[in-house]
Image (cartoon, grey):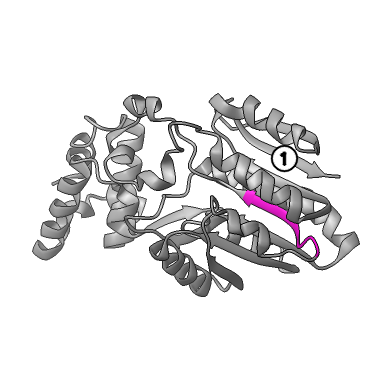
Amino acid sequence: MSYEELWHRLTHIYDAGEAKAIVRWVLDVRFGLSWADILCGKVTQLSANDQTELEKTILRLEKGEPVQYILGVTDFCGRQFHVAPGVLIPRPETAELCRWITQETEVRSQASGHFTILDIGTGSGCIAITLALEMPEAEVTAWDISDDALRIAQENANSLGATIIFEHRDALDSSLFTLHSSLPKWNIIVSNPPYICSGEATGMTKNVLDYEPHEALFGPDEDPALFYKRIGNYASEHLRSGGRLYFELNPLTAEEVSKYLENIGFIDTEIRCDQFGKRRFLKTMKI
């Protein structure tokens, strides 16, 4: 089967550009075929065993299974991360959040030296690992409620050479307030918590809704901003003076989250848009 035939089989789920990119990625990662190889028609020259494996992969893609889960990897901030069902697939938008943090922290860290970062709801570890590698002077801790996520995050940290302290923690557990009851501990707290409202599910694609973990996607129906509020409460107690809190946001609750944080004493709150013009990121500071 040719490259053209392969990507056309996916156009009932993806637009043509994305379908082509997915098939090229499969051919590269799984079969070692470069774009030049594809242009030369080497897809049709694969061995019988490889043709069988390729067909199985395309059948899974036709059902909507994310290519990242099929291949077991995804690219994030120029690095390859292992992903598997049960762990949210890192998004390009989250990479924008990492770049914002590193750009702002570079100047500050030169003056202050050692500093600490906490990533709440780490998933694959993409935020924590990226920050640790981009800012080696930082001591980075990452929390998640999922043992599977923590295992995968630790594997990613090991393979990428990042030193992270991983801890099993529930961001909604009120006992977090007693974990560090002496002095404020963190210079930076960052989180990309579950934030999608259940009413938004009808507009979500099959490959996300049917395969990615709902507990990492959806906030509680009764209060979609609950994670932001609980993490904000924790940050108000455990960020050092001048410390910063960063969130990836649901644009629908951006204003509510911003006002809540200001009401509990945070200052200099800034909301930024992502590459699609949606209000996606927030930064605020503790006095």
Q: Give 12 or 23, whichever is nearer the viewer.
A: 12
Q: Give 97 or 229, whichever is nearer the viewer.
A: 229
State whether residue 100 appears in this view: no
State whether residue 191 appears in this view: yes
Coordinates of residue 55 in the picture (x, y in percent):
13, 52
Q: Is residue 131 left or right of residue 64?
A: right
Mark 1 lies on a secondary structure that is strand
Q: Is residue 217 left or right of residue 104?
A: left
The residue sitting at 69% across, 60% down in the picture is: 117
Residue denoted by label 1: 283
Q: Give 153 or 31, whichever is nearer the viewer.
A: 153
Tell me how many marks there are.
Answer: 1
Coordinates of residue 238 in the picture (x, y in percent):
74, 56
* Disc 1 crowd, CA 10 A, few/some/many (<14, 14-19, 20+): many
Q: Is residue 6 left or right of residue 67?
A: left
The residue sitting at 62% across, 40% down in the picture is: 229
Coordinates of residue 110 in the picture (x, y in percent):
87, 61
Q: Give 230 or 199, whichever is nearer the viewer.
A: 230
Determine the image quadrant of residue 96.
top right
Q: Main secondary structure of the magenta part?
A: strand
Coordinates of residue 169 in the picture (x, y in percent):
53, 61
Q: Which residues are magenta?
A: 183-190
Q: Is residue 23 above or below residue 147?
A: above
Whether residue 5 appears in magenta in the rendering, the answer is no
Q: Is residue 252 left or right of residue 287?
A: left
Q: Is residue 125 above or below residue 280?
A: below
Q: In which quadrant will I find the C terminus? A: top right
User: From this viewpoint, which residue is outermost toward the right?
Assistant: 111
Q: What's the residue type where badge 1 is placed? A: Lys
Determine the image quadrant of residue 72.
bottom left
The residue sitting at 27% across, 35% down in the picture is: 206
Whether residue 184 appears in magenta in the rendering, the answer is yes
